[in-house]
Each structure stands twice: as structure tokens, then as C-alpha cells.
Amino acid sequence: MCEHANNPPPTRRTFYGLIIQAIGAAIAAVIAVPAGMYLLMKPKSAAGEDLVEIANLSELAEGAPREIVYYRTRVDGWKRTREKATTWVVKTGQSNAIAFSPNCPHLGCIYHWEDDGEKFACPCHASAFSKEGKVVGGPAPRPLDRFASRVEGGKLLVSSQVLRG
């Protein structure tokens, strides 16, 4: 018997069907690969800590709170955004400083330093805090929150990580 009787040669219709299936599979792969990577891979993040140099410690007066405005990079999933940030810094020693979050721990209002009263004062609900961030008046439930920070080579480095007061 002839071999062609069991396996007829492919027709034009069969060939086009295979081509259409191959194109469909390629389109599905183009869509599925990025979607799978998005769902299965971790987003980019700052390698290690996200410390930003905000001040030269030698330029700060010891015990005098100073508001410092700086720029940091915020990573939100795959998106990196450069944003303006602020912190209150109190130099506590030759090579030590505390960087406070600018938000009152009561309801998140922005507080300020009052030289005459020697305190941080929140205008929203009259909370008050010492230079060390301790509550000295008002409804605040805890001391001022701090940013994780450290001093390297005389420079104050601050993280966006908030440490509860």
C-alpha cells in the first residue's frame, strides 16, 4: 500500500490554520510574559537603605532645632519619584543628631519650633514637645516620631523610614 493513503499531504487550509495558531501563540506570549513578570517578580527597591545626606553636622548649632528641606527618591512599586521632604534636626552632640518627622503624632498636623517657649508647638490641637521630642502638653499620644538616621564622615544621613516616638 502507498504511504500517502494513510497521511494525505497538508492542504492549504491546514497550513493557514497552523500559521494563524502560531501568530495567536506569539501574541499571547507578548501579553503574558510582561504580565507574569509584573505579578511574580519583586518591584525594584533602593538597594539597602534609602539614606539621603541632608546636612553637614559641623554647620548645625548644638541644641538648636533647625528645619531642613531636602529631596529624596521615593520608590512606589516600579515607579521612582523625586520628592521634596522636610525634617526637624536637633544636634545632640559633636557627632550625634536626631531627625524628627515633621508631623505631629496626634493627627498629623505640621508643627513648628517656638524659640520663646523652647518647644515644638502644633497649631492644630495645642500639643507641645521638648527638644528631645517628649510630650510636654496637649493631646499627643506619644513623643515625636523620628526618622532613622546616622552620621557618617560628619554628614547627617536620613532615611524615609519613620520610627515611632
Image (tube, grey):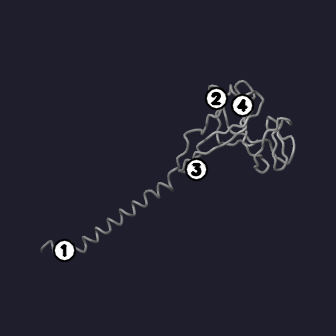
Residue positioned 35% across, 62% down in the render: 26
Reading the image, the residue beneath label 3 is 76
For marks 2 and 3, give the CA distance. 27 Å
Q: Residue at x 85, y 47 (%)?
A: 126
Q: Please, which residue is most extreme toward the top here?
A: 94
Identify the residue position indicated by label 2 in the image: 155
Indicate the quadrant containing the C terminus: top left, top right, bottom left or bottom right: top right
**Which circle's residue, 4 or 3, is located before the other in the chain?**
3
Residue at which label 1 appears: 8
- Do the residues bearing badges 3 and 1 touch, measured as CB atoms within 8 Å? no
Q: Earlier in the sequence, mark 2 or mark 4?
A: 4
Say what amino acid the circle numbered 2 marks.
Lys
Q: Amino acid at mark 3?
A: Asp
Q: Secondary structure at mark 4?
A: strand
Q: Mark 3 and mark 4 in contact (Cβ < 8 Å)?
A: no
The x, y position of residue 42, in whole percent, is: 52, 50
Q: Which of the marked residues, 1 or 4, is nearer the chain's N terminus? A: 1
Query: 15 above or below 26?
Result: below
Alpha carbons under labels 1 and 4: distance apart: 85 Å
For label 4, the residue is 97
Q: For residue 115, which quarter of the picture?
A: top right
Could you classify mark 4 by the number of other residues whose Cα lies within 10 Å: few (under 14), some (14-19), or many (20 or more)?
many
Q: Quadrant of the N terminus?
A: bottom left
Q: Contact, CB < 8 Å: mark 2 with mark 4?
A: no
Amino acid type of the residue tagged 1 in the rendering: Pro
Determine whether label 2 and label 3 are within 8 Å by CB.
Answer: no
Q: Is residue 116 above or below residue 44?
A: above
